[in-house]
Amino acid sequence: MAFSDRLFSGTVYVVIGLFVLFCGIPFWMVVSNSVASESSLQTIGYQLLPTDLSLYAYEYLFRGKQLWSSYGVTVAVTVIGTVLALFLTSTLAYVMAHRKAKYGSLLSFMTYFTMIFGSGMVGFYMLVAIWLGLKDTLWAMILPYLLNPFFAFILVAFYRTIPYEVNEAAKIDGANEISTFFRIIWPMTVPALATITLFYALQYWNDWYLAIMFVDDYKLHPLQIMIRQLIANMNMQSYLQGGTVSFDKPLPVKGVQLATVCLTIGPIIFLYPFVQKYFVQGLTIGAVKG
Amino acid sequence: MSEIGIYKELKANRHLYLLALPGVLFLLVFAYLPMIGHFVSFKRFRPSDGLWGSEWVGLDNFAFFFGSDDWLRVTMNTLFINSLFIVFTLGIALVLAIFINELRHALYKRLAQSAIFLPYFVSWLVVSFMTYAVFNTSDGVLNKLLTSLGREGYNWYGNADLWPYILTILFVWKMSGYVTIIFFSAITAISGEYYESATLDGASRFQQILHITLPLLRPTLVVLLLLQIGRIFYGDFGMIYGIIGDNPILIPTTDVIDTYSFRALRQLGNFSMAGSVVLYQAIMGLITIVLFNWLARRIDRDSSLF
């Protein structure tokens, strides 16, 4: 290999290595320091390799009420939201892609227009909080995200690749469009549906916009808002415990923050190796056409 | 199509349209109905009077918004911060994708992609927590590092001018993996024959990138650029409000249209003022996206979005 090629290749390895560290170190710091003792966090600060270890922050969280209720809210919102969103998005996208539906392109335009001209925060707030009266309910954190136009168009691109003969064969067998869709098209599009499902699940798990807009009741705080509450540092003790348990040791302020962050990103990091390929696939389809 | 034609079509394909009904209802209720809310910007809204009962005030709310210094400040902040995000994220992601493609060890290649993509999967509030851990004055990682080197700690949260750039670093951290994957998939779609014949002609790796990879990535770059410029009037609320919150010292340089209208709505309870800001944003956004789509079509027919 020529010298210039070797120099270039060396640069490539170093640059990528540095960027990988830049992306990875914050995760390592959060996870490793969440098991550091509160006294070492307070005196030494964050360390690459904490020496004085303690699980007290986790114990403190597990014995309080807030973590369990926040986890419950986040899981409920994610599961219910993802299932409903998958149903709504796939049915609409299927009709948009269907060559028999004359109004398919009208539906596409209706969906597309919402991407370029928003209703805006104020009308949206009025709708959910005043007209629908969903303030301080789980539904306020679920309903608004049921249809993401971008994901719908990813599915449309996928449905277009299915040969129309499939529909014709089903029709000859006497199936109507609804049963064709659920019995034949769904099983054929599992990879695309998996991608959409995961994108929705991630969106629900990480969202805090809807919660900060519509939820004041701390019993309905999702995990993300719990993190925010812990950073703000107000009345941490009664917030976390729910006023029932008492501890002889003081509240591990920093440890509890780190542990909550770990418990929030934990499921994502755990599932990441298995689901990454579906996200990559979604981006690849999405990139083909906007 | 006549009324009878519409009825005929709906009847002939009734199962199909039934299938689309939940989605259509959703769009009507959650995307189109709230557009009525734009009327609030022409009213002096009081919740007790409702949207229709409130008094019409014509363009008073707009006069107030454009008469203050706020509109120029939040508009410029939005455009400036988004421009930084677009330039650095696309630029860095392009380099990363090309470099990852140059890696020869399959395992290292996979690990690098996974690590760079990982930050995309955490919420902005988690990023906000990490940011505070790094930058806070009393015991942040950065200041601990400075003091251990014998330097004095710096009050990062006290210098507003730094934050557009700090936000850019955070945005690059979280989002460049996403864009890298898109570029990378475009690179892997390039036929290997180009590189083979270039190698036979004695072109170095670097020359091949310059004369083969980059030109062939142009359409992808243009589409991504357009998508993002089309949304340049929309600040990333989840990010900026998550990280900056209501910190009054940082607001002058980091307050974007979205955080400004959020504050007007949720903290001041001023629906009409928030509404006029939001309508201004929606119209500017619409103009931008139509304009840039038209431009793209003139430059390159295949690059336009619609």
Image (cartoon, coloured by chain):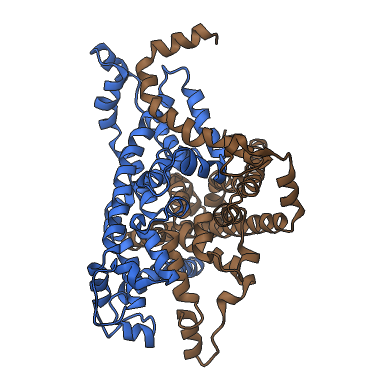
Chain B in the picture: what colour?
A: brown
Q: Position of residue B140 (x, y in %)?
A: 46, 80
- Quadrant for the N terminus of chain A in the image: bottom left
Q: Position of residue A68 (x, y in %)?
A: 26, 60
Which residue is pictured at 47% across the width and 36% down the height?
A: B30
Residue A156 visible in rendering: yes
Residue B206 visible in rendering: no
Please state the total of marks drawn on the protein image.
0
Q: Pick whichever, B302 or B64, lies toward us.
A: B64
B117 w.r.t. B279: above or below: below
Q: Position of residue A72 (x, y in %)?
A: 27, 54
B249 w.r.t. B153: above or below: above
Chain A in the picture: what colour?
A: blue
A148 w.r.t. B76: above or below: above
In the picture, measured across the screen, residue B175 lies left or right of residue B14, that is right
Q: Quadrant of residue B219?
A: top right
Q: Quadrant of residue B223?
A: top right
